[in-house]
Amino acid sequence: MALPVSPDPTDRRAAVVRLLTASPEGLSDAALARALGGPEAGVRPQTVNHLCRRMAAAGELERVGTRPILNRLPARPGRRRRRTKGAAVEAVPSVPEPDAGTPAAAGPVPAEPAVAAPEPDTPVAEASAAPTPPSAEPSSPSPRTTLRLPKHPPKAIATAPRRQEGPTCGPPPYDALQAWSRVVNVQALVASWLVRRGATLRSASLDEGPARDLVASLDGDDVHVEVTGWPADGARTHPTTIAGDWFSAAEQAAAERRRAHPRARIVIALPDTRRYRSLTEQRSASLAGARAEVWFVDAAGAVHAR
């Protein structure tokens, strides 16, 4: 049964969290779109894809697998608790090592007396008792609490050095069976252009949705690229209308990346079309507020900044 969905993105996030909580094995973008009402409620798989990618960037969920990619809530690591006894310092029994020249006894070992004499190489901590007035009559010795610590302290564990740079990757492949303006090819063209400029690619997403991303290091700066393509022909909705929705989703994703990476370069990469250039001019003030750059990519692989 589809859930009633509010246009408020906060309500949609909460609805996605509820659905993923009920399905811990994960749900695809299409399954979430159907559960949220489907096209009749104005919820398309592309809209859910953008929402889930933003939630994944914020750490609210994780996207795993391929064809289809499943969205699921991140596993919460269990907290290990140590059980402590009544005493502030836990007594650790120490078993004396047998002497090399003394044969082991064949019979059972008798229990130690309540008051144990301290061994030469074992530190002994005695429980403090309140002072008692001297008595003329001899009194029996009071029992003592003997706390034995282990002879050998735990060894120090060597920690591995932290890596200064993330792993590198190659440019994603170009799909010659699709138009150059599709997102998979726009991503490949931008990645190849960055490599020619001397950049180091650190990650490249391979999502099946209308948007992908790239992370690279260029001239000492971290560059986060939000890549969006042009819709395919034959859809019920006109491509220019879908392109407007995709542009808005890319703009929101860029704003969230700016909050997560305040010192990095945030870029929106788009195929060079009149529709995307018009949307960029209309949203220039919002893009300037997020300090987001816009790159236009042509069919030859050239990249032009706005």
Image (tube, grey):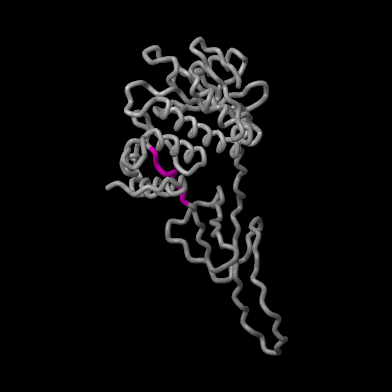
Rendered position, 170 above or below 256: above
Q: Residue furthest right?
A: 134
Could you say where residue 297 lies in the image, as x and y percent from the top left? 53, 17
Decide if residue 69 is on the left or right side of residue 85. left
Could you say where residue 163 lies in the image, as x and y percent from the top left? 61, 31
The answer to whether any part of residue 161 appears in the image is: no
Residue at image x 61%, y 78%?
142
Residue at image x 44%, y 35%?
50
In which image quadrant can residue 36 be found? Answer: top left
Residue at image x 70%, y 84%?
132
Could you say where residue 195 lies in the image, as x and y percent from the top left? 57, 15
In which image quadrant can residue 122 be found? Answer: bottom right
Q: Give the quarter of the figure containing the C terminus.
A: top right
Q: Main secondary structure of the magenta part?
A: loop
Q: Residue furthest bottom?
A: 136
Decide if residue 201 is on the left or right side of residue 30. right
User: Nearest the camera: 99 or 111?
Assistant: 111
**Residues shaded magenta:** 71-78
Decide if residue 294 is on the left or right side of residue 35. right
Residue at image x 59%, y 75%?
143
User: Nearest the camera: 237 or 28?
Assistant: 237
Q: Is residue 75 magenta?
A: yes
